[in-house]
Image (tube, rainbow, N blue to C red):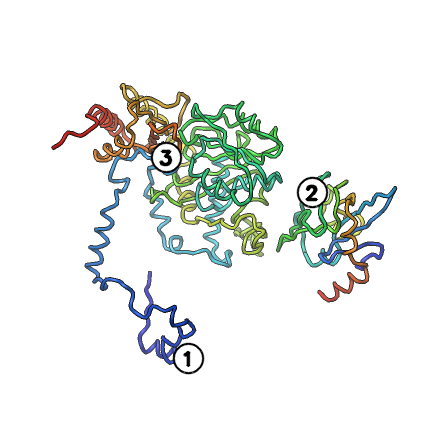
């Protein structure tokens, strides 16, 4: 599945879609199709609660496959506005629609600086090809 | 166990194979100044006969609980161990087996774990049990760590002063470097006061650690305590006595979130105080935070019943530093003994042994405290242990003299509780007879009435 071009990507395989309204930036975040394919059969997911603080590069939750538990790293810094609470109960959604229905959190960004660390779709695809 | 030795010809062949000219060659990388260059300062080797005599003489310095009448408790108890346990657990298939790194090749071991877990769930009323932990004290700590993880409240835990003092020391050791504050609620009446506990709660409290029956043998109001901690958003971690569940309500029925125990009472004799068997069970919703191994039942590709380790993704061999625990030693042999014990006793047997402990302990409490010198330290109901106060405050001499008379009369409490310096803890199991209890009462009275300074001979 190609990485959509409007999104920003972290080297740890999370994506963020940043939308600015009235000067406030909100990021919708999830994990990439590449990550989901690498993780294989998912069995469990844990997401933070609304109101939790997340920090770019730090863990915000975890996802468990039959083989391993993997941390989810936040691509942005801010406060959680919304959580896709239906997702842990319907993990197949992640594989089917990782950039849409498979969203995990909406975060009100409180620090713009970490955004500059994120990659474009092209650059991220190149990283994936190298990891192959 | 076979002993493998090698001959000088075999040593030569091995040295030749690796290209070394002598054993000495293998150590050339160790700098000369770091080497001993002389034989170890050891006495000459003993012959088999002399060695046997030497070890027997050393062993004779021990005072095994079985040689005296044992009223010691505080976590390890002199309960009866049915012969069937040694007969089955002593079989080579179990006795000498070590954790196989491909666990599924040892289906028998996995079946034992699965049956043990099933019995522990039935005993405790909890949803899931792991395959065992190191011992009771570390199991209690793992219960607290689980609560801290589940609630995302790493800063504060509340513990009752009536929890085993050594378990609390282990907890302090674990939490010290995590910067977690351990709040201890005093229990001056021998059990927790609900108001004191409620006041100690706040929105950073991960859990309340309760022991029931507690270290003093007293009964805590577990269901009410669970209610208090749940209202604060924390979990209730209960340390239980497996034998007590023959007559007391199960942790699960009293809304405990995690139930942990020392499992020595279930078919293992007293062995230097442990470690024996750490029992841990919890509600299903916390299963992914449960440390240690869990065996599950499934079917193979031919549809036959078989067993596999499950939820291993959080174990240390896969998750390293992010594992749920890095000290989750599995006490497989003791878990097997516990499973055999529970299967042998059944619900009626468990009830019977618990009732015997209760009745005998109450008879002992009556007999020991009917004179002038000794009194019960606390007035509340107790199970198989109780605290005796010596009004003359000469506990250590008293216990030493009782020991000389053949009685391990109890554990002095002063080293953990300065305010109970004049008290000792007495445990009475189903093994104690009326004659032994009466004799203990007589011995303590006799010691009590003897002059405090022995007359010069």
User: Is B181 positioned to the left or the right of B75 in the image?
Assistant: right
Residue A97 visible within the image: no
Q: Name the residue under label 3.
A: B415
Depicted B369 relative to depicted B334: above or below: above
Q: Which of marks 2 and 3 is in front?
A: 3
> Can you say whether B114 is above or below B125 in the image?
below
Q: Which residue, as the protein is rendered here, is positioned at the far left?
A: B457
- According to the picture, the residue beneath numbered tag 1 turns out to be B17
Q: Which residue is drawn at 50% across and 56% down?
A: B103
Q: Kindly report the distance in space between the C-alpha atoms of the residues bearing marks 1 and 3.
A: 60 Å
Mark 2 Cα shell of 10 Å, populated few (<14), some (14-19), many (≥20): some
| Chain for disc number 3 | B
Q: Are marks 1 and 3 in contact (CB under 8 Å)?
A: no
**Disc 3 on helix, strand or loop?**
loop
Question: Which residue is more in the foreground, B63 or B78?
Answer: B63
The CA distance from mark 2 to mark 3 is 45 Å
Residue B110 point in image, percent of width and height: 48, 51
Given residues B361 and A92, the one toward you in this image is B361
Query: What is the crowding at mark 3: few (fewer than 14 residues within 10 Å), some, or many (at least 20)?
Result: few
In the picture of the structure, the residue carrying the numbered disc 2 is: A48
Q: Are tags 2 and 3 found on a single chain?
A: no
């Amino acid at each position: 599945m190609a990485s959509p071009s409007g999104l920003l990507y972290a080297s740890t395989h999370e994506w963020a879609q940043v939308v600015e309204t009235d000067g406030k930036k909100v990021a919708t975040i999830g994990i990439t199709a590449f990550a989901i394919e690498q993780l294989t059969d998912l069995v469990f997911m844990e997401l933070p609660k609304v109101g939790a603080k997340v920090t770019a590069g730090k863990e915000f939750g975890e996802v468990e496959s039959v083989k391993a538990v993997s941390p989810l790293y936040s691509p942005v810094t801010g406060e959680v506005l919304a959580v896709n609470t239906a997702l842990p109960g319907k993990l197949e959604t992640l594989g089917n629609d990782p950039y849409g229905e498979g969203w995990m959190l909406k975060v009100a960004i409180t620090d713009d600086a970490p955004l500059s660390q994120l990659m474009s779709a092209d650059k991220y695809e190149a990283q994936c090809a190298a990891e192959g | 166990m076979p002993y493998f030795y090698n001959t000088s010809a075999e040593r030569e062949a091995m040295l030749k194979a690796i290209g070394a000219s002598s054993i000495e060659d293998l150590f050339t990388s160790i700098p000369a100044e770091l080497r001993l260059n002389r034989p170890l300062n050891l006495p000459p080797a003993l012959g088999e006969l002399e060695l046997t005599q030497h070890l027997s003489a050393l062993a004779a310095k021990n005072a095994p609980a079985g040689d005296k009448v044992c009223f010691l408790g505080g976590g390890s108890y002199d309960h009866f161990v049915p012969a069937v346990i040694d007969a089955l657990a002593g079989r080579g298939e179990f006795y000498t087996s070590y954790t196989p790194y491909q666990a599924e090749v040892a289906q028998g071991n996995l079946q034992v774990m699965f049956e043990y877990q099933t019995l522990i769930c039935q005993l405790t009323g909890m949803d899931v049990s792991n395959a065992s932990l190191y011992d009771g004290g570390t199991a209690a700590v793992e219960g607290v760590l689980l609560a801290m993880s589940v609630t995302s409240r790493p800063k504060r835990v509340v513990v009752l002063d009536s929890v085993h003092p050594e378990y609390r020391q282990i907890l302090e050791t674990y939490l010290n470097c995590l910067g977690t504050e351990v709040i201890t609620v005093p229990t001056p009446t021998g059990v927790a006061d609900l108001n004191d506990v409620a006041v100690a709660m706040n929105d950073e409290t991960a859990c309340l650690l309760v022991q029931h029956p507690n270290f003093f043998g007293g009964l805590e109001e577990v269901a009410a305590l669970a209610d208090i901690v749940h209202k604060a958003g924390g979990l209730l971690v209960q340390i239980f006595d497996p034998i007590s569940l023959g007559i007391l309500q199960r942790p699960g029925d009293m809304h405990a979130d995690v139930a942990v125990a020392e499992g020595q009472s279930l078919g293992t004799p007293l062995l230097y105080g442990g470690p024996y068997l750490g029992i841990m069970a919890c509600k299903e919703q916390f299963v992914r935070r449960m440390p240690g191994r869990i065996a599950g039942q499934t079917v193979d590709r031919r549809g036959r019943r078989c067993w596999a380790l499950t939820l291993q993704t959080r174990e240390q061999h896969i998750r390293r530093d992010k594992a749920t625990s890095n000290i989750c030693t599995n006490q497989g042999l003791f878990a097997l003994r516990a499973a055999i014990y529970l299967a042998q006793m059944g619900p009626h047997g468990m009830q019977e042994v618990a009732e015997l402990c209760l009745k005998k302990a109450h008879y002992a409490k009556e007999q020991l405290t009917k004179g002038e010198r000794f009194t019960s330290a606390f007035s509340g109901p107790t199970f198989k242990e109780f605290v005796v106060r010596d009004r003359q405050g000469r506990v250590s001499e008293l216990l030493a003299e009782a020991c000389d008379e053949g009685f391990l009369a109890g554990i002095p409490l002063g080293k953990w509780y300065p305010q109970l310096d004049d008290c000792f803890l007495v445990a009475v199991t189903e093994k104690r007879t009326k004659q032994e209890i009466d004799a203990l009462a007589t011995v303590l009275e006799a010691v009590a009435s003897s002059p405090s300074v022995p007359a010069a001979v």
